[in-house]
Amino acid sequence: MAETAPKRQKTSKSTPYHLVYWPGLPGRGEHVRLVLEEAGAEYTDTAHTEGGMGEVLSYIQGKQPPVDDVANLPVCAPPILRHGELVINQTPNIVLYIGKREGLVGDAEDEDGMWRVNALVLTALDGLSNEVHDCHHPIATGLYYEDQKEESLRRSADYVKNRLPKFLGYFQRVLEAKASGDGPWLYGGNLTVADLVLFQCLDGVKYMFPKAMAKLQREGKHDRVFALYDAVKERPRIKAYLESKRRQKYGMGIYRYYEELDLEG
Ligand SMILES: N[C@@H](CCC(=O)N[C@@H](CS)C(=O)NCC(=O)O)C(=O)O
């Protein structure tokens, strides 16, 4: 009979989290960091530890988790979270795991809330992260931007004209819906991981498409979305984090600045 995964030892409340992500840029790891920072959780991060890059490579080259780990599966790409004996990947999966443990997925009494919050996280990542990446890599992730500049321009023009307003419009509708509750947050009147993920997505899009975002803000149709952005930025722990050295500058990750792609829409 095949060996089954043994029951994982419960991680205690004080077990620190360990984020495995490429050093040098915020990337998808940033969503995980913002959740950890808002929660005031103890964590380590390969972006700031010696040998961090080597550690990331050891995961994507299949050296970690070891092949004889009977519980954890190989991971495909960072971000990766190690928490006690657990190793998981996929940004929204990690965000949900930490969010649930740290009370950031909605009211504890609201059993279905977590799934609604997760739908918002997935939607923000679809439209304001993955599609943005495809604006500078519309043909192949493995090719250089310089090899797909013409297509990037076409893709970006369509993105700022059609897709970006569509997703901002969607989140505006969510914020106007009764279920979003009072205050600036997306769901149930409480700050959740969805607000943090949306904040990071908006921040990245502002960096990559400043002209289009300024125009959309001037038009005033997405005022609640921009208000949420400001409200997250003012959370005391988030504010302190954004001003700290832990917050890395944008570079050659998902959100990049290319002047020729900075279109108004
Ligand atoms: N859907 C995955 C995407 C993971 C991903 O593409 N990670 C990037 C960094 S942000 C990477 O290093 N990818 C390596 C590769 O795809 O070969 C997630 O959200 O975690």
Image (spheres, helix red, strand yellow):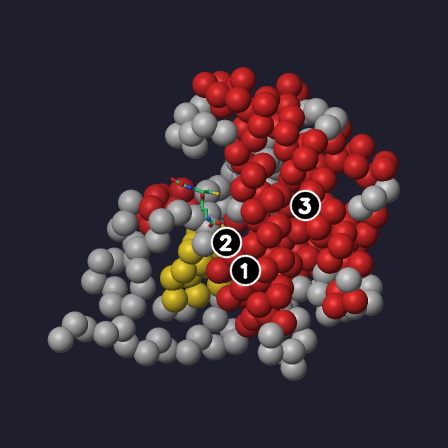
* Residue at mark 2: C-beta within 8 A of ligand 1: yes
Give amino acid for label 1: Val
> Where is residue 191 shown, x and y percent of the image?
71, 64
Cα separation, mark 1 vs mark 2, equals: 6 Å
Give amino acid for label 3: Phe
Residue at x-position 66% and y-position 71% = 106
Say left or right for 57 vs 218.
left
Counting residues from the start of the chain, the first of labels 3 and 2 encountered is 2
Say left or right for 161 vs 151.
right
Q: Secondary structure at mark 2?
A: helix
Q: Is residue 240 above or below residue 136?
A: below
Q: Taking the image as drawn, is residue 208 in sight?
A: no
Mark 2 is surrounded, within 10 Å at the Cα level, by few (under 14), some (14 to 19) or many (20 or more) other residues, namely many
> Where is residue 223 shown, x and y percent of the image?
83, 48
Give amino acid for label 2: Thr
Give the residue number, with chain letter if any, for mark 1: 95
> Where is residue 5 shown, x and y percent of the image?
27, 73
Residue at x-position 22% and y-position 58% = 67
Give the residue number, with chain letter if any, for mark 3: 167
Mark 3 is surrounded, within 10 Å at the Cα level, by few (under 14), some (14 to 19) or many (20 or more) other residues, namely some
Give the residue number, with chain letter if any, for mark 2: 91
Q: Nearer the viewer, mark 3 or mark 2?
A: 3
